[in-house]
Image (cartoon, helix red, strand yellow):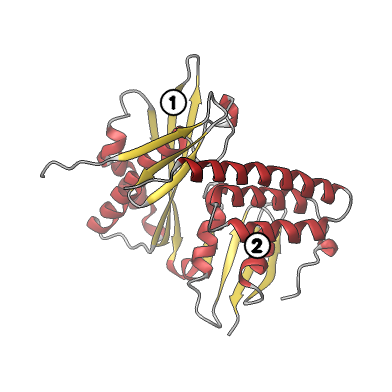
Amino acid sequence: MNELNFEVTTRWSGTGRDALGTVETGNQVVAWSVPEGMGGRGEGSSPEELLASAVATCYTGTLSSLLNRDGLPWERVQVRMREQVDGSPMRISELLVTPEVLGGDPARHDDYQAAANLAREHCFIGKHLRSDVDYRVGSVSVQPAESAQDELDVRSLAPAQRHQVIFSTIDRLEAGKSLTLVNDHDPLPLRYQLEATRGDSFSWDYLEEGPKTWKVRIGRRS
Amino acid sequence: MEGPDRATVVAMSSTGKLARILDQALRELGDAGEVESACRMAASAYALLEKWDPVAAERFTGTLHHLTCGLPREGRGVRAS
């Protein structure tokens, strides 16, 4: 492969840890700051989250390629990445990826798990970290096609990602169609945001209300 | 690529500070019993900021989660679907 070069620009405005920065990558601008737990303002992303994102995105792309190569059916892949930072001086001690395959064949779970484990070996961003960090793959969840078609389960997503994923999904709903949102808490905040940003163009019906799982049928009005 | 200049970064920072003040005010409004009103204002603030300053907008997602936590079923005054 020819040599490829990638470039990002970071900016930092302010003094000390209580400051705000941006990172420009491609045509995206992402705000970042030092996490609150490290004495910063905790706004936007952070170097720690950006590193986890780099590994998670590379892993996700690698996994989707392996699923295709092995002829395993899938419609969407969601990967949750947990990064642990500890010690003194602080270091990244653990990266745990937990993949979820939507629209897959649960009877072939072992094949999906093997592909998920192999994706860790092939993920070239992760390769750079494996000698220093305990980089592991969790148990793969495989959801069948019929449930994936009209169900949006956001429980495996980081809380900060959920509303963005939900909004982009329901905005693609055709008039008269609906989906079932599955969450680990009452998604009532989302309902207020839907009404404030999209008026009454969506219906909202609770199917299950806790205590551990909430299911809401969200429909796009004709 | 030309990134945001210092004025833009400062403006975003100011918006973030204002968002923090409004967040605090809405939480106190909710604590005073005006949860429904506080939720509607938090959602409106989110709608105003979501395109221009997503980071500040996300603060109001947190506000809404705080306000609706423990809200009884009958207390949900959102329009009927």
Residue displayed at 49% across by 29% down: A84
The answer to whether residue B2 of the structure is visible from this angle is: yes
Tag 1 subunit: A
Secondary structure type for disc 1: strand
Q: Which residue is mark 1?
A: A92
**Circle 2 residues within 10 Å: few <14, some 14–19, many ≥20:** many
Q: Residue furthest top?
A: A88
Give percent across and percent down for residue A176.
Answer: 56, 83
- Extreme residue toward the bottom, this view: A222
Amino acid marked by disc 2? Gln
**What is the CA distance from the residue labelled 1 to the residue labelled 2?**
35 Å
Give neighbour class at mark 1: few <14, some 14-19, many 20+ (Cα, 10 Å).
Answer: some
**Circle 2 — which element?**
helix
Residue drawn at x 83%, y 46% as measured from the top left: B28
Residue for badge 2: A193
Vertical relation: B35 (above or below) A45:
below
Amino acid type of the residue that numbered disc 1 sits on in the rendered structure? Ile
